[in-house]
Image: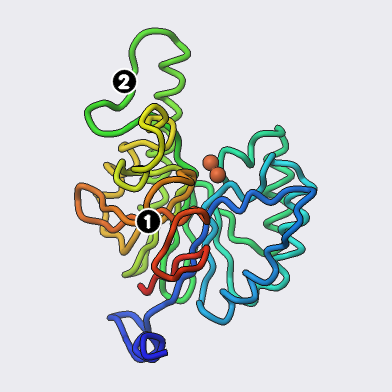
């Protein structure tokens, strides 16, 4: 309770602290036994904005998106989201995106949106690996296409960052920008969990924090080489809140 009072009183140059609830990898299924409705009701009482970091649906089916959209009616605060790889699985990503936008979600795919004096910048990101071991553009066209996709996502992030006009910025990704927050996953799949190219782009700007999902067995906290805080908010990852979502105050 004391923490919440402090948050309410804290101010920044541009306004009061904004409380952001962030969670990824809901993987909503058609045959879901449990609904997200109670969770969305809870975050509406705890936070000013809800951020969803991709894998919103389990197989990218429009029906799954409809179930999520219905559950989001219990959410009384603005919702910002990016898509994840699972949202592409059924080849119906445009339908999934349309359903979520119709439900009022600020679905970001290389754009920025401003809510309560915070700039939210969102892009899905892509695979490719980390640091000096990142996959390079060499050899077969298929490898080069993969690297090109990774570079393209970073460039789209950069273009979106350039649109930000706010003092505070939250970067929203699905894939990890640093290796630290995927620790705990099998080593063999690290290159499929994200790409340092995202962190290289992030570090060219001033950002308040970065959130991502995708690495279900990763860890909560990391940092870009330039010092930006990074949080893996996949719902399976243990967080200081003890809840499936993280609470950030920026
Ligand atoms: Fe996931
Ligand atoms: Fe994923």
Residue corresponding to mark 2: 136
- If you read the primary sequence from the N terminus, does the residue marked by circle 2 or circle 1 appear first? 2
Q: Quadrant of the N terminus?
A: bottom left
* Residue 145 image position (x, y, % from top left): 46, 19
Seen at 53% across and 47% down, the residue is 109
Seen at 76% across and 56% down, the residue is 33
Q: Residues within 10 Å of mark 1 (few under 14, many from 20)?
A: many
Asked if residue 42 lies left or right of residue 162, the reply is right
* Residue 14 image position (x, y, % from top left): 33, 80
Q: Residues within 10 Å of mark 2 (few under 14, many from 20)?
A: some
From the viewer's side, name the closer residue of 63 and 200: 63
Could you tell me which secondary element the residue under label 1 belongs to? Answer: loop
Residue 215, relative to residue 141: is it above or below? Answer: below
Does the closest atom of ligand 1 sit within 8 Å of the Cβ of label 1? Answer: no
* Residue 164 image position (x, y, % from top left): 38, 60
Looking at this view, name the residue that lies furthest to the top: 140
On the question of residue 223 being in view, the answer is: yes
Looking at this view, name the residue that lies furthest to the left: 226
Seen at 34% across and 18% down, the residue is 137
On the question of residue 123 being in view, the answer is: no
Seen at 34% across and 31% down, the residue is 129
* Residue 152 image position (x, y, % from top left): 42, 33
From the viewer's side, name the closer residue of 178 and 167: 178
Compute the Cα span from label 2 to label 1: 28 Å
Residue corresponding to mark 1: 220
Residue 150, relative to residue 108: is it above or below? Answer: above
Looking at the rendering, the quadrant in which ligand 1 lies is: top right
Give the quadrant of residue 117: bottom left
């Amino acid at each position: 309770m004391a923490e919440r009072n402090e948050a309410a009183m804290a101010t920044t140059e541009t306004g009061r602290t904004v409380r952001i609830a962030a969670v990824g990898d809901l993987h909503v299924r058609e045959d879901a036994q449990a609904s997200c409705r109670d969770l969305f009701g809870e975050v509406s009482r705890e936070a000013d904005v809800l951020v969803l970091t991709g894998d919103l649906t389990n197989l990218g089916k429009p029906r799954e998106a409809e179930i999520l959209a219905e559950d989001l009616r219990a959410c009384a605060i603005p919702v910002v989201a990016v898509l994840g790889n699972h949202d592409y699985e059924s080849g119906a990503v445009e339908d999934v995106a349309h359903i979520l936008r119709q439900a009022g979600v600020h679905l970001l795919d290389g754009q920025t949106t401003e809510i309560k004096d915070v700039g939210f910048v969102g892009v899905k990101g892509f695979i490719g690996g980390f640091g000096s071991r990142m996959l390079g553009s060499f050899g077969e066209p298929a490898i080069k296409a993969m690297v090109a996709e990774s570079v393209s996502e970073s460039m789209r992030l950069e273009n979106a960052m350039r649109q930000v006009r706010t003092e505070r910025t939250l970067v929203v990704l699905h894939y990890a920008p640093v290796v630290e927050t995927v620790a705990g996953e099998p080593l063999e799949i690290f290159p499929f969990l994200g790409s340092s190219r995202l962190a290289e782009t992030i570090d060219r700007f001033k950002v308040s924090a970065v959130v991502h999902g995708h690495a279900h067995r990763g860890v909560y906290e990391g940092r870009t080489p330039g010092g930006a805080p990074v949080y893996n908010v996949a719902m399976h990852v243990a967080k200081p809140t003890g809840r499936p979502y993280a609470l950030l105050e920026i």
